[in-house]
Amino acid sequence: MPQPRAQQTALVHSGYTPPDGFRGCAAPIQRASTVLFENVAAMRERGANCQDRSAYTYGLFGTPASYELEARLAELEGGAHCLLSPSGLSAIAMVDLALLDRGDDLLLPDNVYSPSRELGDWLMAKFGISARFYDPMAGAAVAGLIRPETRLIWVEAPGSVSMEVPDVPALCAAAHARGVTVALDNTWSAGLAFDGFGHGADIVLQALTKYQSGGSDLLMGAVITRDPELNRRLGLAHMHLGFGVCMEDVYLVLRSLPTLKLRFQAHDAGARQLAAWLATRPEIARVLHPAFPGCPGHETWRRDFRGAGGLFSVQFQPQYQEAQTDRFIDRLRLFGIGFSWGGAASLCLPYRIQHMRTGWNTPGQLVRFNVGLEDPLDLIADVEQALAGL
Ligand SMILES: Cc1ncc(COP(=O)(O)O)c(C=O)c1O
């Protein structure tokens, strides 16, 4: 006979066990900081960390739902390992901190996502790591910049504001010839439109905040690798930095994954329709969309990519001043003014590209569109009425 327990103990330790055999379509989520071991020997055997995802040790390092999301993201990118982190930016920081030591050199594309650039400057000031910026269109010519102490080269395909499409295979070949690791921010392609590992990257990063979430309502990042040793080094940084993720957010991303490709294709079609219309407008000097001739690296996009997603930029004719294009954005009704992309609602933002990208010598205000999932004809009508205000 089990000993009767005090009411307070029963409130903590319930004798209830759910019946076996339940299966739903959605993966269940388990919230946990503490993970319980079967016995002390199991606890001692597993230790505090479980890098190979074969068991559970502590909520910070994973639950069945986070292991599943990691495995599915690795599969999507053609990788073997994946580590989740609390945002896309934290995933970038994890890569930098895992692979760089004092005295090492880091190369970043000059059009890199701005917080990644600021992180490079911060690493330089704080840890004596040199961060230098290269022309994203350099391709094989990046070889001329590599120093004996260069350890890591980041590449963004394409840059998420200037939309320049780099020659990733040429850059990777140059880096690998000198033993340098290449990390690719593949967020624009959502792991669908560009095969990062197939084109030579060693590490593929996704800001799951964008398309994988699709809801503009959570932050998460993923770092995917093929090489176990790279994954081990990244896993150490992941553990030391304590990069846990919220299981509800993991659930939301798992829930969004089945529709990822359908949504991405709809974003792509809508963006191309709006971009094609903008290309006919007298107010627009340049459409910076990788699938459109005239975008730097368009030929590389044609060679290497399978799609485009919803993000592109335009440059207005030089006679329009910043105050005018700001007013254009303010007049838009269907496009929110806000950072990020990949959600259902369209967004629009101005960027001072001439201050961001060295040597950007085409005049004209740059405006970036994130085309959501609205009817493209309504979006075109909205942009048309806002242009009329110019
Ligand atoms: C290209 C790119 N990479 C990474 C990130 C970082 O993602 P997060 O917002 O989840 O930190 C962003 C965010 O806008 C981005 O545009």
Image (spheres, rainbow, N blue to C red):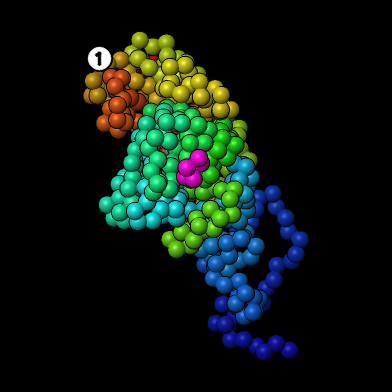
Instruction: Kindly indicate the quadrant of the structure image that contains residue 277.
Output: top left
For disc 1, the neighbor class at 10 Å (few under 14, some 14 to 19, many from 20) is: few
Q: Can residue 216 be seen in this view?
A: no
Q: Ligand 1 is found in which quarter of the picture?
A: top left
In front of the other: 370 or 375: 370
Residue 145 sits inside the magenta stretch: no
x 35%, y 10%: residue: 282
Instruction: Kindly indicate the quadrant of the structure image that contains residue 352.
Output: top left
In front of the other: 368 or 304: 304
x 32%, y 48%: residue: 130
User: In which quadrant of the rendered image does the N terminus lie?
Assistant: bottom right
In front of the other: 93 or 263: 93
Residue 126 image position (x, y, % from top left): 29, 55
x 42%, y 22%: residue: 296
Q: Can residue 316 be seen in this view?
A: yes
How many numbered discs, if any? Answer: 1
Callout 1: helix, strand or loop?
Answer: loop
Q: Mark 1 highlights which residue?
A: 319
User: For this view, does 257 lie left or right of residue 166?
Assistant: right
Residue 178 sits inside the magenta stretch: yes
Residue 66 image position (x, y, % from top left): 58, 55
Residue 181 image position (x, y, % from top left): 48, 45
Magenta stretch in the rendered image? 176-182
